Image (spheres, coloured by chain):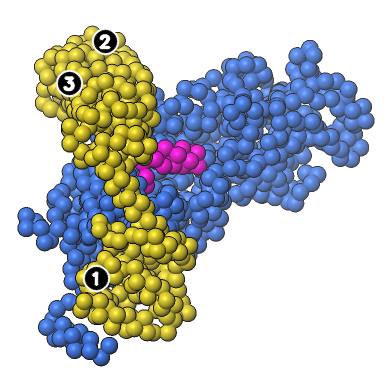
């Protein structure tokens, strides 16, 4: 060892760097390994010229053509440009929604934003977000979950934010540069440019040339701004970004200095920003949902529970890891979490943290960015399932919309009620009581909700949405106060098969498959119906993602300050979990729905509907299918 | 061999430090450890080693790995990569040694290569198990290719037929045309090999056989090279069969057709415009084929076709041509009061 020291000292004295700049061009191969060839162990994916999804990664022109075709003449999909990239290319965004900015009930529509392709080399990202648009487009003509989303949410999808960088990776799909930059201690030996381009294309041309290449006039392989470090509020505040333009995580000269980040902000404004309820930035790899806790406890908890629901869709193969409040790296999920107070994620698509060795890859440290083509069809499907469930959850909690009770055999109506929008934030209850409820008579009870409540398996049977475990049957009780003021309660039989799959059959689903439920009941003689002071229904049911009913439909649920507003629990207090609906009274004693005078539950917050005032309101012309017509 | 001596001399230097309790390193710490002069010199010494010296080096390093895992794992990783190079020895004892690494538990963990957040995630700095598996797989592949080249030279079609398609595809890819012609009728061949045979020989019959037997994924890989190896008329016929028989590949086949451009392709593509699943790809193919005849046909559709897939795809074809003549056709459509209003407004948005 002593003999080595003079050599080292000599090098230092000569001012020579101990680490020589490596400037070689790398080539990715399946099986061939050499000094500048890296064997991945699976075929190196090349961009595929196909508009429709295949076992592979579509070239940008075909991907964009596919989306333009789906949009042209569509009632549910339209395209806009968000502005131009650094090199002047249009950055398109697709709006998947009907065009009225209202939910099916008439309330202001919420919005969500999905961002693809912010990091150029992460090819799974544009495929996955495009797959979500394709799923919505494919299913738009059937009244299921997808149509519910299209009519009740404005979904904004950017297929490829970093369009210049993405084209650079597709221009050199099997080539890259070994790093020429030793000034970034955290990311020193990382491959750059070509297939491994991460940043935008600021200050660089589209040639791939190594510094020792005699034809290489401009050594710009390391240039560009990391668009996921260019955002408020944490730009340039951590060691995970750099002020050196050659760094892999260069944060740019100012927040939102880059046209691509400005385009992302323009996308948020299309929500408009005040209507946003969810943001996901699609990256690879590590198989995890990253997020940022902001210190807003309700928002942080909702971000976690939303992640829990989405993760369960894929068997919890994906993790969840939020950064603590007050620190960050300048990423886009932080921007949306802090600025817009909504659940926001950096979703790192598979493979897991160990990269493509999980598919038999040969252990190259960056192979996780090169998902094998044979995996992408599955990944598209899995993440469409997970993301659509997340969108469904953020579209809003479930609430009861209508009830009808008829005598089973004669069809004679006994009781009809519906919640109808009264203004931008409220519903009023319209009730018609046609006959008293009697014991030992067979009735049919039909309940309708404001969203699809159940999924179906391949055989058409009622089922949980993938990975969820929600009680499939609702809990339904008839309860009240007898003539002496004593409470009574009778549980009704509520089989899982009661969910109504189709719109149009009678008794039917309302707007969307499985948004309504039908059961039969017969109350025993002992039920103290005669002279009862109050008779009401008591319902407990959760939506596909496990969100319980809004216990007070009078105040419509919205999103405000990072949490739900108008979302009451069983005791009438506003919160984020919902509860039992007891709003429908066949006999009304005029007592408030919650708080003093109600016969159970602690005193709660506000929003009791003025039931007596509405009682008996004429419902001329109300026919279920009539008012259920799609706008 | 002086370089070996240098490396052996360096090893104690590299590995002498007592083992650190921590197994987690920041990337910065890792780089610092590896950018020392000793590590650099070890790297250079490794590069000069004769292939036969690599396996003993692995054994030597493994024996000392617990003492200073960072440089040891780095050295093992580089050595395993060098062993993949053509000409590196791989006998049974070498395979045994590498197989012993397949269950290797990494001792050096670092944050993941993607630096977005990443707190709490630790990954092996060197995935030695996967690297060893890769080296073994490459050795096996080298052996298989060597056997296939031998069988090719001795014209042993029966032996070749028993080999993996991917191996044959590589060997057929480098074989002479004469050798391949001799094999063309000696099938059946696995699809990956048949695709290379059909492409190298430009053989329409083999292409038809391929269409009948290959999976969608195999055909997807074959579309571009095979279509350009056949004559334009043959390729047109083959791609047309692909469109009809393999719906999942119809788009890829239609886009490939757009690169051919015989009259027959244009007619076929124009006829597909109103097909719900094929129309858009036909439009994109036509956009790349902006002949006067295509432009005239599209302009005629703009003037006369009712609102529907055919009209929409004709508009898209002109949109994707993205030149002055196409834009003026679209402009004329926008101002034609009798044409469908919604489409006119969407097209107007394209032109803004
Ligand atoms: Zn990323």
The answer to which of marks 2 and 3 sits earlier in the sequence is: 3
Q: Is mark 3 on a helix, strand or loop?
A: helix
The answer to whether residue B38 is seen in the rendering is no
Q: Residue B305 carries which label?
A: 2
Nearer to us in this view, A25 or A335: A25
> Does residue A141 sit above or below A261 in this rendering?
above
Q: Which of marks 1 and 3 is nearer the N terminus?
A: 1
Calculate the distance from the C-alpha at mark 1 to the C-alpha at mark 3.
53 Å
Q: What stretch is highlighted in magenta?
A: A367-388
Number of other residues with Cα within 10 Å of mark 1, as a class: few under 14, some 14 to 19, many 20 or more: some
Residue at (62%, 37%) from the top-left corner? A464
User: Which chain is displayed in yellow in the rendered image?
Assistant: B
Q: Which mark is residue A473?
A: none
Same chain for the residues under marks 2 and 3 in the image: yes
How many numbered marks, from 0 up?
3
Question: Is B278 or B53 nearer to us in this picture?
Answer: B53
Mark 3 nearby-residue class (10 Å; few <14, some 14–19, many ≥20):
some
Task: Give x and y (percent) for residue B65.
Answer: 41, 76
Tell me the CA gap for discs 1 and 2. Answer: 73 Å
* Percent position of residue A169, x then y: 24, 47
User: Does residue A460 lie above or below A280 as drawn?
Assistant: above
Which residue is depicted at the point 26% across and 66% down? B51
Pointer 1 residue: B49
| CB within 8 Å, label 2 to label 3 | no
Report in which chain the residue with disc 2 lies.
B
Res. B232 mark:
3
Q: In this view, does A246 lie above or below B313?
A: below
The blue one among the chains is A
As helix, strand or loop, the secondary structure at mark 1 comes to loop
Residue A575 in percent (x, y) is at 61, 50
Is residue A369 part of the magenta span, yes or no? Answer: yes
Secondary structure state at the residue bearing disc 2: loop
């Amino acid at each position: 060892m002593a003999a080595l020291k003079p050599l080292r000292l000599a090098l230092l004295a000569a001012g020579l760097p101990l680490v020589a700049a490596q400037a070689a061009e790398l080539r990715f191969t399946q099986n061939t390994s050499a000094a500048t060839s890296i064997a991945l162990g699976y075929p190196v994916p090349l961009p595929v010229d196909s508009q429709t999804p295949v076992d592979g990664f579509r070239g940008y022109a075909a991907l964009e053509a596919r989306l333009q075709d789906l949009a042209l003449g569509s009632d549910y999909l339209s395209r806009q440009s968000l502005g131009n990239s650094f090199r002047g290319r249009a950055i398109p965004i697709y709006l998947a929604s009907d065009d009225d900015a209202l939910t099916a009930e008439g309330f202001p529509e919420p919005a969500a934003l999905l961002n693809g392709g912010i990091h150029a080399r992460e090819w799974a990202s544009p495929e996955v977000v495009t797959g979500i648009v394709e799923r919505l487009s494919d299913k738009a003509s059937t009244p299921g979950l997808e149509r519910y989303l299209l009519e009740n949410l404005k979904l904004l999808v950017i297929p490829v934010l970093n369009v210049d960088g993405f084209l650079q990776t597709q221009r050199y799909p099997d080539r890259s540069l070994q790093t020429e930059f030793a000034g970034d201690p955290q990311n020193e030996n990382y491959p750059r440019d070509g297939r491994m381009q991460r940043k935008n294309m600021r200050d660089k041309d589209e040639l791939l040339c190594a510094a020792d290449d005699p034809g290489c006039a401009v050594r710009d392989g390391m240039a560009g701004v990391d668009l996921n470090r260019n955002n408020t509020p944490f730009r340039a505040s951590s060691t995970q970004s750099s002020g050196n333009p050659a760094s892999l995580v260069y944060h740019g000269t100012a927040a939102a200095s880059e046209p691509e980040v400005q385009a992302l902000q323009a996308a948020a404004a299309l929500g408009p920003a005040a209507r946003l309820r969810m943001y996901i930035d699609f990256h690879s790899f590590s198989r995890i949902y990253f997020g940022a806790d902001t210190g807003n406890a309700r928002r942080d908890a909702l971000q976690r529970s939303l992640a829990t629901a989405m993760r369960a869709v894929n068997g919890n193969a994906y993790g969840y890891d939020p950064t603590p409040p007050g620190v960050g790296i300048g990423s886009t999920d932080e921007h949306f979490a802090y600025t817009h107070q909504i659940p926001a994620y950096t979703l790192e698509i598979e493979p897991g943290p160990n990269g493509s060795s999980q598919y038999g890859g040969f252990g190259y440290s960056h192979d996780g960015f090169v998902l094998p083509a044979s995996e992408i069809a599955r990944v598209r499907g899995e993440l469409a399932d997970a993301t659509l469930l997340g969108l469904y959850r953020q579209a809003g909690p479930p609430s009861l919309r209508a009830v009808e009770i008829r005598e089973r055999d004669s069809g004679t109506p006994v009781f009809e009620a519906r919640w109808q929008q009264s203004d931008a934030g409220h519903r009023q209850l319209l009730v018609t009581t046609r006959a008293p409820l009697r014991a030992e008579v067979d009735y049919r009870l039909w309940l309708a909700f404001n969203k699809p409540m159940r999924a179906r398996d391949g055989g058409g049977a009622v089922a949980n949405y993938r990975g969820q475990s929600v009680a499939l049957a609702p809990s339904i009780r008839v309860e009240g106060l007898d003539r002496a003021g004593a409470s009574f309660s009778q549980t009704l039989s509520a089989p899982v098969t009661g969910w109504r799959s189709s719109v149009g059959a009678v008794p039917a689903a309302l707007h969307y498959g499985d948004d309504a439920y039908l059961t039969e009941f017969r109350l025993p003689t002992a039920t103290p119906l005669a002279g009862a002071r109050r008779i009401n229904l008591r319902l407990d049911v959760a939506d596909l993602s496990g969100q319980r009913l809004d216990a007070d439909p009078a105040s419509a649920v919205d999103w405000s300050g990072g949490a739900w507003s108008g979302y009451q629990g069983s005791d009438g207090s506003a919160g984020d979990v919902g509860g039992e609906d007891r709003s429908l009274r066949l006999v009304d004693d005029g007592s408030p729905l919650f708080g003093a005078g109600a016969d159970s539950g602690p005193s709660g917050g506000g929003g009791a509907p003025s039931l007596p005032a509405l009682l008996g309101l004429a419902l001329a012309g109300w026919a279920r299918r009539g008012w259920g017509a799609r706008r | 061999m002086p370089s070996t001596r240098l490396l052996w001399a360096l090893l104690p230097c590299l590995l002498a430090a007592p083992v650190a309790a921590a197994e987690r390193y920041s990337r910065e710490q890792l780089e610092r450890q590896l950018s020392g002069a000793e590590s650099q010199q070890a790297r250079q010494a490794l590069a000069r080693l004769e292939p036969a010296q690599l396996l003993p080096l692995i054994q030597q390093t493994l024996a000392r790995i617990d003492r200073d895992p960072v440089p040891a794992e780095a050295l093992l990783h580089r050595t395993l990569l060098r062993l993949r190079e053509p000409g590196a020895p791989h006998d049974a004892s070498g395979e045994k040694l590498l197989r012993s690494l397949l269950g290797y538990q990494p001792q050096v963990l670092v944050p993941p290569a993607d630096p977005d957040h990443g707190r709490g995630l630790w990954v092996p700095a060197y995935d030695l198990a996967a690297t060893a598996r890769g080296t073994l797989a490459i050795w096996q592949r080298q052996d298989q290719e060597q056997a296939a080249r031998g069988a090719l030279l001795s014209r042993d079609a029966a032996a070749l037929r028993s080999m993996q398609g991917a191996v044959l595809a590589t060997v057929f890819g480098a074989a002479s045309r004469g050798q391949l012609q001799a094999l063309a009728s000696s099938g059946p061949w696995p699809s990956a090999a048949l695709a290379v045979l059909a492409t190298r020989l430009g053989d329409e019959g083999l292409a038809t056989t391929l269409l009948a037997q290959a999976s969608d994924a195999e055909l997807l890989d074959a579309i571009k090279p095979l279509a350009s190896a056949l004559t334009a008329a043959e390729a047109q016929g083959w791609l047309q069969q692909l469109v009809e028989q393999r719906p999942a590949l119809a788009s890829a086949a239609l886009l490939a057709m757009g690169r051919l451009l015989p009259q027959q392709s244009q007619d076929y593509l124009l006829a597909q415009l109103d097909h719900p699943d094929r129309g858009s790809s036909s439009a994109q193919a036509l956009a790349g084929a902006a002949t006067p005849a295509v432009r005239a046909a599209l302009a005629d559709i703009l003037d006369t076709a009712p609102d529907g897939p055919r009209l929409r795809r004709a508009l898209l074809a002109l949109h994707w041509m993205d030149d002055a003549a196409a834009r003026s056709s679209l402009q004329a459509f926008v101002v034609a009061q009798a044409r469908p209003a919604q489409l006119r407004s969407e097209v107007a948005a394209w032109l803004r």
